[in-house]
Amino acid sequence: MIRIQRHSETAAAKIAAAPRCLRSLEERLADDMRELAFSGQDVSVEMLKYRGWSEPTLKRLVPEAAKIARRQSVRQVA
């Protein structure tokens, strides 16, 4: 049986399959947080700003990035 696909179905499938940029930003921030923590420095907004993160971005991403960093650190230590 031949099925005709409309462009909207194809485009929606491609968008759903594409990785989200937001997730990669959270993972990068989590990596920076872990790097600071394992080097013995405090993980603070000032230190993250020094590494190039802006304050609005930090406000948006820190809660999820902290969870990711904690999960990765537990896996690494365990």
Image (tube, grey):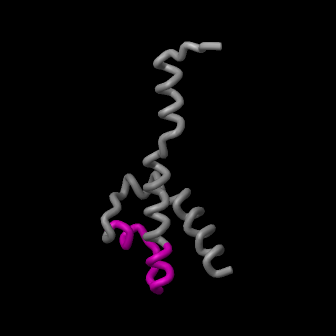
Name the residue: 31% across, 71% down: 50
Q: Which residue lies furthest to the front in this view?
A: 1
Q: Quadrant of the C terminus?
A: bottom right
Determine whether 31 is above or below 76 in the image. above
Residue placed furthest toward the bottom = 40
Q: Tell me residue 74's x, y (percent).
A: 65, 74
Is 22 placed above or below 9 here?
A: below
- Tell me residue 56's x, y (percent): 38, 52
Tell me the residue at 48%/45% (across/down).
19
Q: In this view, does 55 lie to the left or right of 12?
A: left
Residue 66 lies in the magenta-colored region: no
Q: In this view, does 24 lie above or below 42?
A: above
* Span of residues in magenta: 34-49
The spot of residue 13 in percent (x, y) is: 53, 30
| Numbered circles on residues, count | 0
Which quadrant, please, contains the N terminus? top right
Identified at 57% across, 63% down, the residue is 68
- Residue extending farthest to the right is 78
Q: Quadrant of residue 55?
A: bottom left
| Residue 24, above or below 36 | above
| Main secondary structure found in the magenta portion | helix
Return the residue nearer the eye: 31 or 19.
Answer: 19
Q: Identify the residue shown where x is 50% and y is 82%.
A: 38
